[in-house]
Amino acid sequence: MLFMASEIMRIPTVAKQFAESRIAQRLAVGLDHVPWTGFVPWDLIQPSFMFMVGVALPFSVASRRARDEPFAAQLGHAIRRALILVLLGIFLRSQGRPQTYFTFEDVLTQIGLGYVFLFLLAHARPRTQWAAAGVVLVGTWLAFVLYPLPPVGFDTALVGVPVDWPHHLYGFAAHWDKNTNFANRADQWFLNLFPREHPFVFNRGGYTTLNFVPSLATMIFGLLAGGLLRGPASDREKLRALLGYGAAGIALGAALHLAGICPLVKRIWTPSWAIFSAGCAALFLALFYWIIDMRGWRRWTFPFLVVGMNSIAMYVLVHIGEDYAAEALHTHLGKGALQGFGAAYEPIVVGGASLLIFWLMLYWMYRRKIFIRI
């Protein structure tokens, strides 16, 4: 929710207007995606969300088993959920376009594409889950490594990347360079199977459909963490395990990057990123497990609980209703009220007011026990 608030309030955009402020500039950098390699806190939003999808699944499966729900019914529900997530993602990305915009790189479609596989693994032993994550990551790494590099002198501007772009990768790491990699080539075939306004050549951000394969590993790591939390170990043992797995994931992901084996690139979800980001998510989970479950400090979580109980509704509201809410605020309050702290801060005021409106809508639903489930 905090990251969603930052996005809707345009904090990075506002911060960039204050070039003389070191604090503002650090805030702008920390709340905007890195151009290619490396990471900032903003880049941990999607992997943390996907990790938590995995964490929640063992509890969901256990609940359905307790109701004696047959495996076939559970599988059917998982397939329906996956399909709805994919279609909802496409629907939201198609807003304001002349026709359906078939791409599959956003968080909803990425979860949907991997969800059925994750569900099947939820019924397997932890050893099988670890093995599946390893196969996914090694297989992804090999696919990129074995795909040939573009010829010497290739004009990367043809795939939307200036030749003098300062973030190009060279040598062995060039296998993961922006828009000349295996996954982008796969999209040039796959996405053009769908009706399009223009033929697909590249994604401006470098994101690809095949991100869902290594991101499945991130969800599997979450699945393993969820199994740990459901297990018989003591709270202290669970906390130590989460801290250990988190530290190991960060260390291994960073080592793969620094050793030149696999660069850390969130936009194409490299195996090193899948491991590194899962480690970060495990540490976040350990922190909140200690605060909420072990220390019992829960009251402060209520605003987040309201959003969490209707997270899909909030996601849709932000994507569909953000512009409408901003327009309504300008209509009924006027620029004078919205620029009370200065014109530069107007996006924060409008975004904060919009977020409050959306939260109040979800609070109304929460009070009436209206929960949108997929």
Image (cartoon, rainbow, N blue to C red):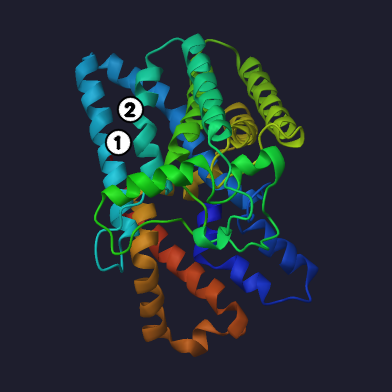
Location of mark 2 (residue): 116
Please state the horizontal and vertical placement of residue 309, each as a whole percent of the image.
Answer: 38, 43
| Side of 42 relative to 248 (left or right) | left
Q: Taking the image as drawn, is residue 326 in sight?
A: yes
User: Looking at the image, is 152 positioned above or below residue 59?
Assistant: below
Residue 50 circle label: none
Q: Taking the image as drawn, is residue 309 in sight?
A: no
| Side of 68 relative to 346 (left or right) | left
Residue at 60%, 47% in the rendered image: 177
> In this view of the protein, which residue sits in the foreground, 110 or 324?
110
Number of other residues with Cα within 10 Å of mark 2, as a class: few under 14, some 14 to 19, many 20 or more: many
Q: Earlier in the sequence, mark 2 or mark 1?
A: 1
User: Looking at the image, is 345 positioned above or below residue 247?
Assistant: below
> In this view of the protein, which residue sits in the foreground, 18 or 331?
18
Mark 2 and mark 1 residues within 8 Å of each other at the beta carbon: yes
Residue at 68%, 63% in the rendered image: 164
Label 2 SS: helix
Please state the horizontal and vertical placement of residue 185, each as a whole percent of the image.
Answer: 45, 45
Residue at 67%, 53% in the rendered image: 168
Label 1 SS: helix
Please state the horizontal and vertical placement of residue 357, each as a whole percent of the image.
Answer: 40, 65
Please state the horizontal and vertical placement of residue 21, each as a whole percent of the image.
Answer: 78, 73
Q: Quadrant of the C terminus?
A: top left
**How far is disc 2 from disc 1 in space, using C-alphas?**
7 Å
| Side of 276 relative to 130 (left or right) | right
